[in-house]
Amino acid sequence: MTTLSSVQYMLVYNTFSFTIAAMFASFIFFIVGRSQVGEKYRPALLVSGLVVAIACYHYFRIFNSWESAFNLINGEYVPSGKPFNDAYRYVDWLLTVPLLLVELIAVLALPKKDREGLFGKLAIAAFLMIALGYPGELSSDTATRAVWGTLSSIPFAYILYVLWSKLGASLSSQPAYVQVLMKNIRLLLLFTWGFYPITYMLPMFGIQAQSSLVGVQIGYAIADVLAKAFYGIMIYWIAYAKSEADGSLPAKH
Amino acid sequence: MTTLSSVQYMLVYNTFSFTIAAMFASFIFFIVGRSQVGEKYRPALLVSGLVVAIACYHYFRIFNSWESAFNLINGEYVPSGKPFNDAYRYVDWLLTVPLLLVELIAVLALPKKDREGLFGKLAIAAFLMIALGYPGELSSDTATRAVWGTLSSIPFAYILYVLWSKLGASLSSQPAYVQVLMKNIRLLLLFTWGFYPITYMLPMFGIQAQSSLVGVQIGYAIADVLAKAFYGIMIYWIAYAKSEADGSLPAKH
């Protein structure tokens, strides 16, 4: 931890507060909005709600940890000696990343034979991806970081393979508009999830974590809002479009 | 209480935070998810919700107690003199363990004659099991610990007897898939509940509670997540499978 200017400190502080607001507002939207789509798609919206509720809790903790990690001395923010607990992010991902994949499968409402085992395989792969990354995150040694980072990439590659090949095949049975939405949400997943390993690798390129502290924290927060809240809104659009297509929309009289 | 390294302290700290997140997320899931199963199975999900709500509250308390039991001095966590209050666990179990058995009976939705008295007998046995264990937990004397531990095992043995013999007989009237799920959940109950007496006996084998402080706290937290949140998810699966089998699933048009 290094001393931060008032502007740097407040930028991160306000980004965390923004993230808390975005997460709890989208929580209300997903839970209350369940009644606006067909019964079949409501479990997907419930899982969207769980993801942003968990993220909201962790951003409260991260916000408090950020506050207690610095003391305001002569207009500058000096490290207080209390650690800024970055592990909240990993704990959050362990819970939410498998659920993000569950959302995606649930909203498709595939026939039983097509979704058999898909939930379990993707959730386990997501869990392994996060758990294998953490030992590397803790290490300041480039080689150790690289080994765990590579191991963590294997389940990530498997998830992308399943989403593009296996799931791609079952997409053809979906309405045309839903196929477009599904292709967009897969790309959102690829780009937002791809942001995390890039941040992970920064220290390996000689960019010190301290000097990029502000950028990394703001980057993670924006990636989390896109990968959880905005992703959930896209799930809602898909649920709405599918309800419209199969005539289960409650709003349709 | 002994001085802990930063890694040891933070491992327990983050495990408690993880448990809080897991408990409240599963609370939302059980309460909102009630509408996704048949009317008959909703009381079981409500009870699942109560269990994880109570556990969430206690893990907030345990988390705060852990924080206040240590002071960060020169990068190490030194006991502050304030006790770490382990009694929260017993208070939690007194309330939640009888409810866990109520969940299991409720989701079966047995005919009235088969469930007569079953709720009451199991709930009282569960209450006795916890209450009889506590005097031993407080004692550092091996003989006292062994006496109360043995007394506490009698209601535990009775609970297992009821679940395997009496409940086993009424299982045959359930759909085949539900029978498999019920057998799995009984095993989950046996293994997670069996973890607690093992931890209870550690001091009797000369393993000092202090030296295994970190392991015991993490072990209890994981056992609680499995025995309450994951157990509740299995109850949800059973409720969903039974709703599907008897045609009471709201999602089915």
Image (spheres, coloured by chain):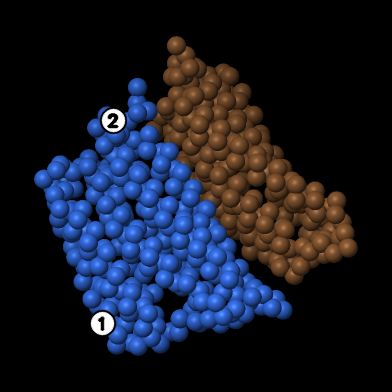
Chain colours: A brown, B blue
> What residue is shown with label 1?
B147
Q: Who comes first in sequence, dot 2 or dot 1?
A: 1
From the viewer's perspective, is A63 left or right of A251? right
Image coordinates of residue B15 in percent, x first then y, are 54, 63
In front: B56, or A172? B56
Q: Inspect the image, locate mark 1, and give the three-letter code of the amino acid beneath it.
A: Val
Residue A99, how many percent across, how many down? 52, 44
**Residue where numbered disc 2 is placed:** B248
- Mark in the foreground, 2 or 1: 1
Q: Kindly indicate the quadrant of the structure image that contains residue B6.
A: bottom right
- Quick one: B18 or A66, which is closer to the camera? A66
Disc 1 secondary structure class: helix
Q: Classify residue A90 by image quadrant.
A: bottom right
State which chain disc 1 sits on. Answer: B
Q: Residue at x 38, y 34 (%)?
A: B36
Q: Which x, y percent locates residue B200?
A: 36, 76
Depicted B245 relative to depicted B196: above or below: above
- Residue placed farthest to the top in the image? A253
